[in-house]
Structure formats: structure tokens, C-alpha cells
Image: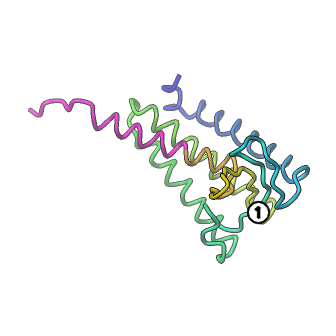
Amino acid sequence: MLAAFNRPGPVLTFIAIALILDQAIKYAVEIYLPMHELIPVLPFWALYRTHNLGVAFSMLSHLDSWFIVGLRLVIVAFVLWLWRKTGPEQHFAHLGFAMIIAGALGNIIDRLTYGYVVDYILFYTQTWSFAVFNLADSFITIGAIFIVIDEIIQHRKPKPPEA
């Protein structure tokens, strides 16, 4: 199954499905969730609609939107280049690259559509809360974890003897 992410067709299909899901959820959040109002789902998880004008954790929010879109496009191009350069046996890395591309494109679409990124997932306790994020951010984070896992797997493989 993971080997399919070595080929462009399955990767493009995954990215398209991820984008549709991400954008459908964000559209529903924009329509139905009130702004800056905590809606508990579980004791540690809530829906909380907010708008992110920067990148991850609102960093670079002082920069122009077009600069941020351009930066994200450069990142997508770089990740595509990495995907092409990665060996066919590195299945987790290929899946990770696809997830990062899907997440980055989802947030680019937000920026172009709304002028900001729609965030809505909040993990919290009585004394602590994590930054509000979205499904696209989750794709990026999980994708990065898959790439690290793949690197660990590749590092632990026995090296062929040198001639």
C-alpha cells in the first residue's frame, strides 16, 4: 500500500482527496462556527475558530500575504524535488512528502480564498493550551514525522559491504 506513494498517480489522488477534505471542513467552520468561541468536544479538545495571518503558530504574521504564499510555493516545490530524489524503498518518506504538499496547498488555498488560514482545532487543559491549528497543519506535522521515521529506518538498515 505505502509503495503506491512512489508513483505520481496515487500521490496526486491522495493530495486531491486531502485538499477536498481540508477545504470542506474549513468552509463548514467558516459558515457554522462562531469566531473565538470555545466549543468543547472532549475534556481536552475543543473547536475554536480563529484566523491565522502568518504561518505555523502565527509566525511571520507581519509579512505580506503574497510573500507568505510565495514562501509556501517554494516549500512545495522543494518537497516535490525531495519526493523525486527519494529512493523507491523509502515508503514512509514518500507518504510524508505527499502529506506535507497536501497541507501546504490547503493553507495556500485558504490564503488565496480568505486572505488568512482558517484554524479550528484546540487541545487544552485547565492550565495550558496548544496553538489552534487545522487539518492541513496536521498533514504537515504527521508528514514530517513519517519522514523522520523513514530516516531512522534507513539509518538502521545494514549497509552493503564496500568493494
Residue at (64% x, 76% y) in the render: 63
Toward which corner of the image does residue 73 lie, by quadrant?
bottom right
Mark 1, Cα crowd under 10 Å, few <14 / some 14-19 / many 20+, is some
Q: Does 23 sit left or right of 82 as displayed?
A: right
* Front position in the image: 60 or 32: 32
Q: Position of residue 163 (x, y in %)?
A: 8, 32
The figure's colour scheme reads: rainbow
**Amino acid of disc 1:** His
Query: Residue extending furthest right?
Result: 31
Instruction: Give the extent of the magenta segment.
Output: 142-163
Quarter of the image holding residue 25?
A: top right
- Seen in the picture, residue 34 relative to 58 is either above or below; the reply is above
In the image, taking residue 94 as reference, residue 50 lies left or right, namely right
Q: Position of residue 109 (x, y in %)?
A: 73, 55
Residue found 77% across the figure and 42% down from its top: 41
Where is residue 68 shown, x and y percent of the image? 63, 67
Residue 96: horizontal and vertical position, in percent? 51, 40
Kindly give the residue lying farthest to the top in the view shown.
1
Label 1: which secondary element: strand
In this figure, which residue is indicated by the disc labeled 1? 51
Residue 102 sits inside the magenta stretch: no
- Outermost residue toward the left? 163
Is residue 159 on the magenta stretch? yes
User: Where is 133 relative to 91, above or below?
Assistant: below
Q: Main secondary structure of the magenta part?
A: helix
Q: Residue at x 65, y 39 (%)?
A: 15
Is residue 92 positioned above or below 67 on the image? above
| Callout count | 1
Q: Nearer the viewer, residue 150 or 42?
A: 42
Reply above or below: 5 against 33: above
Q: Residue at x 76, y 61 (%)?
A: 112
Q: Is residue 90 left or right of residue 18?
A: left
